[in-house]
Amino acid sequence: MPDQTLKNKTIKGMAWNAFEKFGVYGISFIIGIILARILMPSDYGLIGMLAIFFAFSELFVRSGFSEALIQKRERTEVDYSTIFYFNLIVALIFYIVLFFSAPLIAEFFNVPQLTLLTRVLSLNIILNSLVLVQQTRLTINLDFKTQAIVSLISVIISGPVGIYSAYHGLGVWALVIQSISNSVIRASLLFYHNKWLPLFTFSVSSFKQLFGFSSKLLGAGFLATLFNNIYSIVIGKVFAAKDLGFYTRAKQYPELLSNTITSVLQGVSFPVLASLQDDKEHMVSVYGRLMRVVVFFVIPSLTLLALLSGPFIRFFLTEKWAPVIPLLQWLCFARMITPISSLNMNLLNAIGRSDLFFKVDISKLPLSIAALVITVPLGLKAIVIGNFVTTFISFFINTYYPGKLFGFGAIRQIREMKQVIYATIIMSVSVLGIIMIVPTDFLKLLICVPMAVTIYFLAAHLMKIEEIEEIYKIVRSIYRRRDA
């Protein structure tokens, strides 16, 4: 693919991906605030107890085959159909397992209500399995426009359904109804828009070929899923449901910001980097630019959220959620590092080294276990601080192979970030001054957010940070296309 064509497709894909993620997460953010004001922390805690079971189910249903299809140079309809049937069969198996295991899960947490919750929420596993290949085909073609439209319609309809259910006293079932309705709408729209149906065939040879790549991702995904959810299962077992609710809510907002920016760039970067796997110099150049854009947005955004966590929680969620504040602050700094680590791992996938991806992930397992053993007896805040420490150390582990293979290791990456860090410090000093002077939470939010954005961009402009000009180019490109 010629450089200019690839660049245009990347910019267009990034623009639509950004539109989808910021649109979906923006609407979800508003819906989440409304639901949190109506529901109780324990309602979120009940859902949080089940998160690890659904996460592992989704992991095995996916099994890394989407990435394998994207990474493969020549795909056939037989490949797509084979993976479609595999996804569906595994989803049905896991639904049956969870259906009959539901009483055991409820007994483990000593919450009888989880039996029915597990059996109903597990329907999402089947619904989501139907559209994995659909999404993969769209991603390969960098068609993020269709994905954006589908995601926005799904959340716009399912969100009010959840609010209506919560308002009428359904409690935790409002979250269940919202989730199921979103999956149904999304699956229906993807089949309608994509116009693709699988062939009536399953190729063992195709499966084996793709599994050679995906099996390493499955192993790495198993560990990553364990890392991401082990905190929830430990907190749910050791502490009360409301404590898990506080943790779940504290985790949601930094992940919302971090994952929005990361998924925009990562969703586009993997197929783009994979297409450049034979030109490593060009690949590293593209990767470096993507990382700088991630850092440019993630570091100041999460720093600002940490600084304003008190006013934000008290104003939007009310005092009943006040225990979230210190947890949110620490998790903001932890999630600041996560997108950079994710891009480092994405680079290994793009060159087909899923074996290295797996080695890196397995090397971090003892670190997470040690952190939990040390912090659980010390309380919920200590657990979150431990999560921050392990995330920080994991950054250096994740940068080992990019440094060894491409000369783009931790020290070079930190140097690439330093101007953004300086600009963020300038912004932070200004925000702290306003917080100390302004009396009410509403005014703190009203004044600090626009002022922080203005000061940060001004500092970035004065420091001549390259991403400012890149952002201007993308915006101008979008406007030219819109006016054409």
Image (spheres, rainbow, N blue to C red):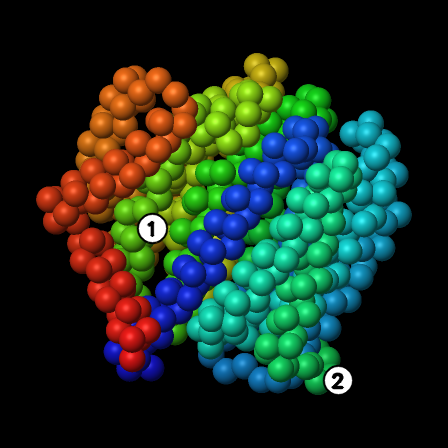
Q: Decide which of 76, 357 is in the foreground and name it.
A: 76
Q: Secondary structure at mark 2?
A: loop
Disc 2 residue crowd, few under 14, some 14–19, many 20+, Cα 10 Å:
few
Determine whether 473 is above or below 427 in the image.
below
Q: Position of residue 370 (x, y in %)?
A: 55, 26
Residue indicated by mark 1: 294
Q: Residue at x 69, y 51 (%)?
A: 161
Assess whether mark 1 and mark 2 are in contact (beta carbons under 8 angstroms): no
Q: CA distance from mark 2 to mark 1?
A: 42 Å
- Residue 298 visible in the picture: yes
Label of residue 67 in the image: none
Count the labels in the image. Answer: 2
Position of 242 with respect to 111 (left or right) is: left
Position of 225 with respect to 103 (left or right) is: left
Determine whether 242 is above or below 347 in the image.
above
Determine whether 213 is above or below 455 in the image.
below
Q: Residue at x 75, y 61 (%)?
A: 126
Tell me which amino acid carries mark 2.
Phe
Q: Position of residue 11 (x, y in %)?
A: 33, 68
Q: Residue at x 51, y 55 (%)?
A: 24
Position of 56 with respect to 360 (left or right) is: right
Q: Position of residue 146 (x, y in %)?
A: 52, 72
Position of 272 with respect to 147 (left or right) is: left
Q: Residue at x 42, y 66 (%)?
A: 16
| Residue situated furthest top in the rendering | 378
- Residue 60 visible in the picture: no
- For the N terminus, give its image quadrant: bottom left
Query: Which of disc 1 and disc 2 is earlier in sequence?
Result: 2
Residue indicated by mark 2: 200
Q: Position of residue 287 (x, y in %)?
A: 31, 59
Tell me which amino acid carries mark 1.
Val
